[in-house]
Image (spheres, helix red, strand yellow):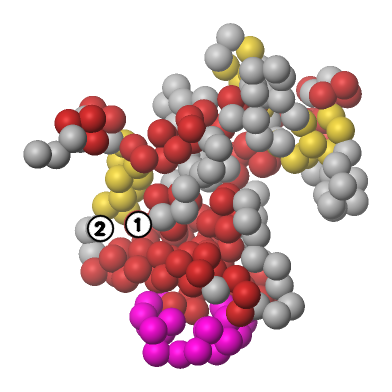
Amino acid sequence: MADPSNRIDIRDVTPAGTFSAWLRHTRQVLSSDVGAGVPCGDCTACCTSSYYVYVRPDETRTRARIPEAHLVSLPRLPPGYLAMGWDENGHCPMLQDGVCSIYQDRPQTCRDFDCRVFPATDIQPVDKPQIAAQAARWRFDYAAPHDLDDHAAVRAAASFLREHADAFTSWAIPTNPNLLAVLAIKASAAFEEAPDRASRESPAEVARAVVAAVRQFDTTV
Ligand code: SF4
């Protein structure tokens, strides 16, 4: 008999949208400032999960709203970027009474964050239990065959990156789950025509195709 604690309560399922439409929009989010527009409802998991929020140098309105004491520079950030950390509870200091106190001027990082990347890639947000709980609630729609094909390509990309990080001679594949999921979305074009290519081609060949797909994505931004 199945463990009843593993059953999904239908009330806990949140529609994530049609997969291909979501993927198209997410690719736009990764290459512009359109923002993810996630239907978060009253979820504040990403504001309460000890994430650094990066703030670009040109986000002047945002910087004016955040007390200087909350902004720090970190190694490996691009020039001019600052980061906002979290309080002793892991909460963003701009979260007040459960609401973002600078919502209209929140950083682009917050506008871009979309925990649907985790179910899209089958990557787990390690050490972020609230994000993991929210991510598990999303359910994509597969109204057309290309929705399934697109999801197969994203999953194949994520799986290859996870299992063959050592096939990339000039790249360090990120271990951060969010960065890894984003990379998989950028790389998924390499698997669109052949989601099973990793079973027919050598890891080095597939890695070259992945690098080409990601470069293509980054140069068309
Ligand atoms: S700035 Fe606002 S939206 Fe961004 S993490 Fe903080 S509370 Fe959340």
Which residue is disc 1 drawn over?
Answer: 19
- Quadrant housing residue 127: top right
Question: Which of the labelled discs sits on residue 142, or is there none?
Answer: 2
With 101 as the anchor, is 188 left or right in this view? left
Q: Is residue 60 above or below residue 154?
A: above
Assign ligand 1 to one image quadrant.
top right
The residue located at (23%, 64%) in the rendering is: 144
Residue 131 image position (x, y, % from top left): 49, 35
- The reply to whether the residue tagged 2 has its Cβ within 8 angstroms of ligand 1 is no
Comparing 200 with 114, the one in front is 200
Residue 173 image position (x, y, % from top left): 65, 65
Q: What's under tag 2, amino acid-wise?
A: Tyr
The residue located at (27%, 35%) in the rendering is: 13
Q: What's under tag 1, amino acid-wise?
A: Phe
Q: Secondary structure at mark 1?
A: helix
Comparing 169 with 52, the one in front is 169
Comparing 129 with 14, the one in front is 129
Residue 183 image position (x, y, % from top left): 58, 63
Residue positioned most to the left: 1
Residue 25 image position (x, y, % from top left): 48, 55
**Is tag 2's residue or tag 1's residue first in the polypeptide sequence?**
1
The secondary structure that dominates the magenta segment is: helix
Q: Is residue 35 above or below residue 129?
A: below
User: Could you tell me how far apart the alpha carbons at marks 2 and 1 are, in whole angstroms?
Assistant: 6 Å
Residue positioned most to the top: 97
* The residue stretch that appears in magenta: 192-212
Residue positioned most to the front: 1
Which quarter shows the C terminus?
Answer: bottom right
The residue located at (58%, 81%) in the rendering is: 207
